[in-house]
Amino acid sequence: MVSCLFDLLLRKHFCILNNLRSGTNSLRFHAFSFRPVFLSDSKSRILGSLYSGTVCIWNYQSQTMAKSFEVTELPVRSAKFIARRQWVVAGADDMFIRVYNYNTMDKVKVFEAHTDYIRCVAVHPTLPYVLSSSDDMLIKLWDWEKGWVCNQIFEGHSHYVMQVTFNPKDTNTFASASLDRTIKIWNLGSPDPNFTLDAHQKGVNCVDYFTGGDKPYLITGSDDHTAKVWDYQTKSCVQTLEGHTHNVSAVCFHPELPIIITGSEDGTVRIWHSTTYRLENTLNYGLERVWAIGYLKGSRRVVIGYDEGTIMVKLGREVPVASMDNSGKIIWAKHNEIQTVNIKSVGADVEIADGERLPLAVKELGTCDLYPQNLKHNPNGRFVVVCGDGEYIIYTALAWRNRSFGSALEFVWSFEGEYAVRESTSKIKIFSKNFQEKRSVRPTFSAERIFGGSLLAMCSNDFICFYDWAECRLIYHIDVNVKNLYWADSGDLVTIASDTSFYILKYNRDVVMSHLDSGRLVDEEGVGDAFELLHEMNERVRTGMWVGDCFIYNNSSWRLNYCVGGEVTTMFHLDRPMYLLGYLANQSRVYLIDKEFNVMGYTLLLSLIEYKTLVMRGDLERANEILPSIPNDHHNSVAHFLESRGMIEDALHVATDPDYRFDLAIQLGKLDVAKSIAVELQSESKWKQLGELAMSSGKLEMAEECLRHAMDLSGLLLLYSSLGDAEGILKLAFLAKDQGKNNVAFLCLFMLGKLEDCLQLLVESNRIPEAALMARSYVPSKVSEIVAIWRKDLNKVNPKAAESLADPEEYPNLFEDWQVALAVESKVAETRNAYHPADQYANHADKSHITLVEAFRNMQIEQEGHQENGDSHELTEQNGEEHYTEEQNGEEGSQEEAVVVDADSTDGAVLVNGNEAEEEWGTNNEGAPACPTSLGPIKTVCSSFWDIYEVRIKFSYRVGYDIWPCICKRCEISRRNQSPQGDMKRFCGLVVCFLVLWFVVP
């Protein structure tokens, strides 16, 4: 029979040097053999000594060399860790022992120990002693606390002493192996051996003590190609292990697993069962001769040293062999020893946090006659089955008495207490509750796995077949590679876990029973509609279990999750591999165990599971009855579940987290509820989000309040300007100024026609050039005042540039239509604070585009009549827009800023951008844009920010255009020479337009 343990052998190759060897991920040594390999207990390190005279330390997790010591030019045949002193001790062919600190790499001690090659060094587990054996046939004991003085010399061997090792059960004794074909047992207090075993027909190379139990065994390996197990109390040979074809160079009793490992110069490593001595597996990695075998205590890792490299393998599996019944009693197996604990022994007054180790009192229950690889309670908890080594034994759970046994590679229980065993891939037996065989089944395919539960499942590598327990009739066939199967206690739900995902299916029991009772034949696919696929999840299940209709599992990332109705919720992130034991409903806790047999609990409310289950079934009335029993700190989890089911209204009522409730209220469009939550939270982002939604919903009063709370000045500007709320814009101007948002403040003041305040704001913001240019276009009477400020400020950095600034009072000839602009300003100043209501925008949208300056001229012309030189005025209609042109002395008249004049208005107020569809930027005789020179009190009615930006763009362009006379104060270019002057004006206009947009526009 082949043991299941070694079917689970995992090859985890660890590479040490370079030059990849195909097929094994191992790396070669060139020219030097690798001698003994030992593992440090405290860290992930491997110590190796080489024939090249080097001692190396590797980190096997990162697969990098951590340290390297150049010991000698001759082979180093043995090296060991002395972890409690952070030392490495090495013996070499130059007959010296050297001691190094493996952290600092300092040499601690060097001394000549023998008169021939040193074959082995061994460290006492507790005392400050080191044993060394040599080809000089001597064994010496060294005490490092006394300056490495030799305390004892052991004589008796007649050939090379190949290895010495301390007895872990009696550290006052040790064994030695020699090429004189004997094994000698020594006592530290006597120079003579206690006794001698004539062990082999040829020289003995290696020896090791059994550490896994109470057996007084040791194992030896010899040049006669055999290994032998000895009872050193009876001095008799227990077993001879044959199979190697060359010298056996290394032997090892594994401390955790029931195995013996032997290595040979034939290049193979053989694994034997330590109880039956059956050969379980043979490893051959093609790295030439095997020289050493090492293990890490508390782990299943084994290191093998070869001529040409080192391999690390992980044997067996790390899942603890344990089972918990419905009352909280746990039984586990440590080797052949069976122990039990009871979770209920932890008093109710002891508070245990989630993930904290439970302080459980361990009781010895007994021993097992086979090595346990699986252990499982039956459904009622009365019996426990142990399976391993191709056999099974059923024990009583309380007294641990043997009730039944037999051959089995696998064992599974049914929900009714029946059970089935898989004796081979072609034979499965079914037994009754009374341990009597009911049926023997020979499937038509190779049965690699079987699973119990509501139905008996048999799996091949490609599919799974379900059978009923009564007559073993085929129920259903599913093409899926199954790794595990989990049935709900109700028998109606089942989870099929594969390598990368899991599937939740519903078992339609009534459909199956109806089909079977009808006497209809069942084809090779089984009963149609026997199973219904409910959910598919792309997660790998490590271990899992059902609680009601809730599937609890931990995934490949070691997160503890549960799935209800296809919704996966993460309960906890586990900090190490853990495995599910069971769930106790009266404690509302799920329990897990790690490989060190530590038991941890995590809270999972049964009421929460029941609530979600009822919601999934559509029984909302009963679900609402359970809801009050769920603690408030779990209500958000319930709300998320309801949201995932599309029940957002219910989720809003259940949720307690304000942020989450706000989001739900926004989803539902319940702005009043969202507002009350925003008042509670006082979050700027929440107010802004609510304000935008309120504005889009037409709730402008709420939008204004929200935007004020959010201090969203740009949003308020949009709102007030769209409403034509002059009072709101004025308040916003002051608020923006207080907040340092000068761009918003400027726009507010400009829209209200408060030009003096605009100029003051520009001056206070140190935007004096912009203030001067704005004054030129809109408040000509302020130009001289601003220019004086500009000169004073500019004089600090560039006096010459300050002198070049032109004041219109000093150089009026450089400022076109200067007197006209002053006259227009005085006319419109009286009506500057009068605003048209926004609802009258349509009445002014189609007015002709005539500048104030031009209108002022027309008034003068009508009063004075036509000039004697025959100047003619002509009003033409072009593309639906009225253009006023003037011809004088063969030259085109100038068309100034395009401003709408409301001829019907009694207050002289002005509307900007009267018609977007008819908007054009005309040019005057010098290519000047048709933008206003003096807008007076402006009421901008805009339905979007584009209107605001358009006004600012035109203003900026006009400012740049008007800067030209200031720059050309001393330039002699004639105003009649229009080509270069017009080009430069356009250029200045574009530059200033760009600067204003860049620095002023938000």
Image (tube, rainbow, N blue to C red):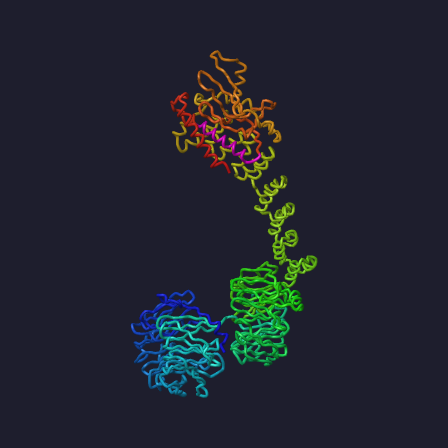
Nearest the eye: 939 or 520: 520
Residue 299 appears anywhere in the view = no
Residue 561: x %, y % from top left: 57, 62
Nearest the eye: 448 or 85: 448
Q: Which image quarter: residue 48?
A: bottom left
Farthest residue to the top: give it: 868
Q: Which image quarter: residue 405?
A: bottom right
Side of 914 where 512 appears, left or right: right
Question: Which residue is drawn at the image coordinates 55% and 34% (left, top)?
Answer: 748
As for residue 947 lying within the magenta part, the answer is yes
Residue 837: x %, y % from top left: 62, 30
Side of 666 where 12 appears, left or right: left
Residue 786: x %, y % from top left: 47, 28
What is the tally of numbered marks visible in this picture?
0
Nearest the eye: 531 or 92: 531
Residue 906: x %, y % from top left: 61, 23
**How would you classify the magenta stretch by its main secondary structure?**
helix
From this view, report whether residue 155 is shown above or below residue 44: below
Residue 52 appears anywhere in the view = yes
Side of 417 where 936 appears, left or right: left
Residue bounds of the magenta highlight: 943-963
As for residue 868 lying within the magenta part, the answer is no
Nearest the eye: 522 or 952: 522
